Amino acid sequence: MGFLPLVILVVGLVVLYGTVKPVPQGQEWTVERFGRYTRTLKPGFNIVVPIIDRIGNKQSMKETVLDIPSQEVITRDNATVTADAVAFYQVVNAASASYEVNDLTRAITNLALTNVRTVIGSMELDEVLAKRDDINSRLLVVVDAATNPWGVKVTRVEIKDLAPPRDITESMARQMKAERERRAEVLTADGEKQAAILRAEGAKQSAVLEAEGRKEAAFRDAEARERAAEAEAKATQMVSEAIATGDVQAINYFVAQKYVEAFRDLARAPNQKFVLMPTELSGLVGTLGGIAELGRSVLKDGDGGAVPRPTTSVPRS
């Protein structure tokens, strides 16, 4: 009598364990009845028919990272490139991922390998190295379309590394160095050109300013000479009028002025080692006396007094 309850308890626990199926978050389980797929269990508490139903496959619904092994690929211009990639995919239909393909991970890996060879093989080496984003976009479109019947969504396919052969790498390094040197020479030449232009502009402005200065100086010199000529003409006119009125002092002044200027030029000459003084110093004294008498006459004339006739004679040479 005590053994039967124990058997019933054990059978009840077995049935309960086979009936209640708690599914973790991020997973989905398929249910098979007599080996045939019937439904998918979602995360949480689920009940199945014991003995008749069983769990088929447990699929992770989280995004999964899949490394694509490296391989050597020949480009369109017959250059060999070593390429490896990485793929990100997510199962969106647990039943399709379980029953539409055998070994889902291996299938996606081989599909990515073949499409990497196809995409890179249709491009030249320079395009492969410069247009990595285009390669990623083309791979994503092709792989995602191919895995769609398997209940898988491929979110990204990225090329991790592209390694050309060593000789091509060295050639590219030399080419890059030559290009940088060429740019440096171009920048240096451009700088020298700009400097030469600035120096020429500075010289041009300096010449213009110098020419304007000479023009202004010549204008002022001409104006000064014009005024000196006017003063000389006026003085000559005054002397002529004085001579016409019989004023001998004006003649003495004019002759004395020229006499003194000639003697001054003779004394200032750079090739003169000594100066000969006139033998008749009384002539020079008389000339100076005539100038003084003329000055007194002008002063008296300005005061309204009578101007006496000078008695000084013209100096002798």
Image: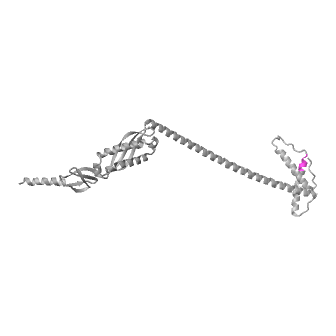
Instruction: Give x and y (percent) for residue 58.
Output: 26, 50
Left of 273 or right of it: where is 138?
A: left
What is the quadrant of the N terminus in the image? bottom left
Q: Nearer the viewer, residue 190 or 198?
A: 190
Magenta stretch: includes residue 185 = no
Residue 117 lies in what quarter of the image? top left
Q: Nearer the viewer, residue 234 or 181?
A: 181
Q: Is residue 63 visible?
A: no
Residue 103 lies in what quarter of the image? top left
Q: Is residue 56 visible?
A: yes
- Whether 67 is drawn above or below 20: the answer is above
- Colouring of the image: one colour
Left of 72 or right of it: where is 221?
A: right
Left of 125 or right of it: where is 308?
A: right
Instruction: Give x and y (percent) for residue 81.
Output: 41, 39
Residue at image point 58% right, 44% down: 190
Write the start and end of the magenta stretch as one range. 280-285
Q: Nearer the viewer, residue 310 or 92?
A: 92
Which SS does the magenta portion mostly show?
Answer: helix
Residue at image point 87% right, 51% down: 257
Instruction: Give x and y (percent) for residue 100.
Output: 29, 48
Instruction: Give x and y (percent) for residue 38.
Output: 24, 53
Magenta stretch: includes residue 282 = yes
Identity of the residue furthest to the bottom in this view: 304
- Label count reads 0
Identity of the residue furthest to the top in this view: 167
Left of 216 or right of it: where is 246?
A: right
Residue at image point 83% right, 54% down: 229
Residue at image point 27% right, 49% down: 99
